[in-house]
């Protein structure tokens, strides 16, 4: 699977909070966001399958 680049625009408060959460999880900000999105997609698939 090829990686693609997307742009995310957000405010400074959300960015700081995401930075904090990524640091706590020992991840880069990009890696943290990707993992959050993957978890969300998996949850949505599970809800749809029910």
Image: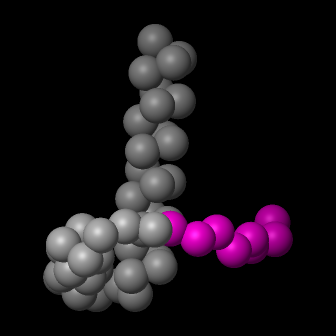
- Between 14 and 35, the residue placed more toward the observer is 14
Furthest residue in direction right, as rendered: 2
Q: Is residue 37 left or right of residue 3?
A: left
Position of the N terminus, as image quadrant, is bottom right
Residue 16 to residue 9: above or below: below
In the picture provided, is 13 more to the left or to the right than 45?
Answer: left
Identify the main secondary structure in magenta: loop
Is residue 45 located in the magenta-colored stretch of the structure?
Answer: no
Asked if one can make out residue 18 in the rendered structure from this viewpoint, the answer is: no
Residue 25 in percent (x, y) is at 25, 79
6 inside magenta stretch? yes
On the image, the x and y values in percent for residue 27 come to 35, 85
Q: Judge from the rendering whether residue 1 lies leftward or rightward of residue 45; answer left or right.
A: right
Please determine whether, in this image, residue 36 is positioned above or below residue 11: above
Q: Is residue 20 above or below residue 4?
A: below
Say which residue appears at 25% left-offset and 77% top-offset.
12
Query: How many dots with numbers?
Result: 0
* Position in image of residue 30 (x %, y %): 47, 79
Residue 5 can be seen, yes or no: yes
- At a point 53% along the width and 17% down the height, the residue shown is 49
Q: Is residue 7 above or below residue 20?
A: above
Residue at 74% over, 71% down: 4
Residue span colored magenta: 1-8
- In percent of the image, x 24 and y 68: which residue is there? 14
Hey, which quadrant is residue 43 in on the image?
A: top left
Can you name the residue that lies furthest to the top here? 50
Q: How is the image coloured?
A: one colour
Closer to us: 13 or 39: 13
């Amino acid at each position: 699977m090829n990686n693609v680049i997307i742009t995310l625009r957000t405010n400074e408060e959300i960015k700081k909070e995401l930075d904090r959460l990524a640091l706590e999880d020992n991840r880069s900000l990009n890696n943290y966001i990707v993992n959050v999105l993957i978890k969300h997609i998996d949850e949505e698939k599970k809800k749809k399958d029910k």
